[in-house]
Image: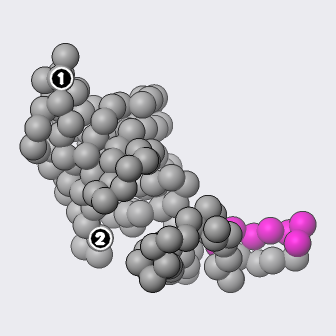
């Protein structure tokens, strides 16, 4: 069965990534920009390494399981290096093109997430957003979040 995870992961990624533009999310935040994406599955067959890279980003995670799969979404249970709790990596198909301004804001939000995680390793960034919050009169111009 262990051998099957690496093979199933490769087959799922080949099928899913060949069908259009995607976004990659990890524990609710976007980690890889839309656009040209390269990938590789390597290492131990029982817990294969998934390496994803694009022009401005490079991500490697140990895959524990394929948590869910649908035509629009591929969810993976993954381990990040140096962490004990597993994360969820989700690859979502996008059927629209985002504006350059929207992409720039989303990339800034993810850079901010990485900077905060690096500078404050004992804190947990629960949520970070650039979406409009009309209930609290917050526009999507400003990034905001909750850290504990």
Q: Position of residue 38 (x, y in %)?
A: 20, 57
The residue at which mark 1 appears reads as 2
Q: How dense is the environment of label 2, judged by Cα within 10 Å: few (below 14), some, or many (20 and up)?
A: few
Residue 104 x, y percent position in the rendering: 49, 80
Q: Name the quadrant of the N terminus.
A: top left
- Left or right: 62, with 3 as reference point: right
Residue for point 42% across, 31% down: 67
Give the structural element (helix, strand or loop) at label 1. helix
Assess whether mark 1 and mark 2 are in contact (beta carbons under 8 angstroms): no
Outermost residue to the left = 43
Mark linked to residue 57? 2
The residue mark sitting in front, 2 or 1, is: 1
Which one is in front, 57 or 122?
Answer: 122
Which contiguous range is marked in magenta? 129-136
**What residue is shown at x 39% (from left), y 39% (from top)?**
77
Taking the spot 15% from the left edge, 44% from the top edge, the residue there is: 41
Report the front residue among 49 and 101.
Answer: 49
Q: State whether residue 93 appears in this view.
A: no
Q: Earlier in the sequence, mark 2 or mark 1?
A: 1
């Amino acid at each position: 069965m262990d051998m099957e995870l690496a093979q199933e992961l490769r087959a799922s990624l080949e099928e899913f990534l060949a069908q259009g533009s995607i976004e990659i999310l990890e524990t609710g935040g976007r980690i890889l920009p839309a656009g040209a994406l390269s990938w590789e599955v390597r290492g131990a067959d029982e817990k294969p390494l998934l390496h994803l890279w694009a022009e401005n980003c490079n991500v490697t995670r140990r895959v524990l399981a394929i948590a869910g799969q649908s035509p629009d979404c591929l969810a993976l249970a993954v381990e990040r290096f140096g962490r004990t709790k597993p994360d969820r990596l989700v690859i979502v198909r996008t059927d629209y093109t985002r504006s350059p301004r929207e992409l720039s804001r989303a990339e800034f939000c993810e850079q901010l997430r990485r900077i905060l995680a690096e500078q404050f390793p004992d804190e947990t960034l629960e949520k970070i957003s650039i979406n409009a919050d009309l209930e609290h009169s917050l526009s999507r111009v400003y990034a905001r979040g909750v850290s504990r």
